[in-house]
Image: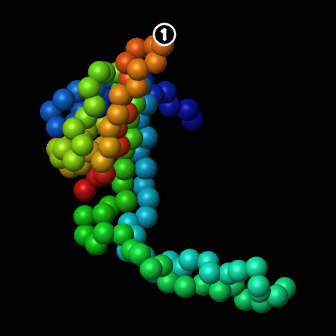
């Protein structure tokens, strides 16, 4: 069953944004014991895969692996490192404390001024 992405509301730290795109991602938290492939071209056919534990792990505590990226209509970037309540309403609902990781504004010929921002959810 298809769901249209209309009627979506987005707010962050008390400001409402007119969004044109929202991406909600669930990623790894970095706390796992996954392995990296250390195989090389010097291995012979039929050799076992060489693997090692990851040398770098995600930030302990607070790293949920959840991010939200938005594209919005507006002339000002979201303040980097700003923290506040992020709320998405509509077909997908999210309400969480978040920190703005990055933000930018794009000016393009024959288009309105658009911004983009990425948030890390706590």
Place of residue 2 in the rendered image (x, y in percent of width and height, measured from the top left): 55, 32
User: Is residue 95 at all visible to an observer of this figure?
Assistant: no
Q: Is residue 118 left or right of residue 35?
A: left
Q: Is residue 51 left or right of residue 95?
A: right
Name the colour scheme.
rainbow
* Location of mark 1 (residue): 110
Residue 59 lies, with reference to residue 43, above or below; the image says: above
Looking at this rendering, what residue extends furthest in the right direction?
A: 45
Place of residue 45 in the rendered image (x, y in percent of width and height, measured from the top left): 84, 85
Crowding near the residue tagged with mark 1, few <14, some 14–19, many ≥20 C-alpha atoms within 10 Å = few
Place of residue 117 in the rendered image (x, y in percent of width and height, measured from the top left): 34, 38
Q: Is residue 3 left or right of residue 92?
A: right
Which residue sits at x=41%, y=45%? 24
Looking at this rendering, what residue extends furthest in the top direction?
A: 110
Which residue sits at x=60%, y=84%? 51
Please identify the quarter of the rendering in which residue 91 is found: top left
Which residue sits at x=29%, y=21%? 75
User: Is residue 21 at all visible to an observer of this figure?
Assistant: yes
Quadrant in which the C terminus is drawn: bottom left
Please identify the quarter of the rendering in which residue 43 is found: bottom right
Q: Is residue 7 left or right of residue 85?
A: right
Secondary structure at numbered mark 1: loop
Which residue sits at x=73%, y=89%? 48
Please identify the quarter of the rendering in which residue 6 is found: top left
Quadrant in which the N terminus is drawn: top right
């Amino acid at each position: 069953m298809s769901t249209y992405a209309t009627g979506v509301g987005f707010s962050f730290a008390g400001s409402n944004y007119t969004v044109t795109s929202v991406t909600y991602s669930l990623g790894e938290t970095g706390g796992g014991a996954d392995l990296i492939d250390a195989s090389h071209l010097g291995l012979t056919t039929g050799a076992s895969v060489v693997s090692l534990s990851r040398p770098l792990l995600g930030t302990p505590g607070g790293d949920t692996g959840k991010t939200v990226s938005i594209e919005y209509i507006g002339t000002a970037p979201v303040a980097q490192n700003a923290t506040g309540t992020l709320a998405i309403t509509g077909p997908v609902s999210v309400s969480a404390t978040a920190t703005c990781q990055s933000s930018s504004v794009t000016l393009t010929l024959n288009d309105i001024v658009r911004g983009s921002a990425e948030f890390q959810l706590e």
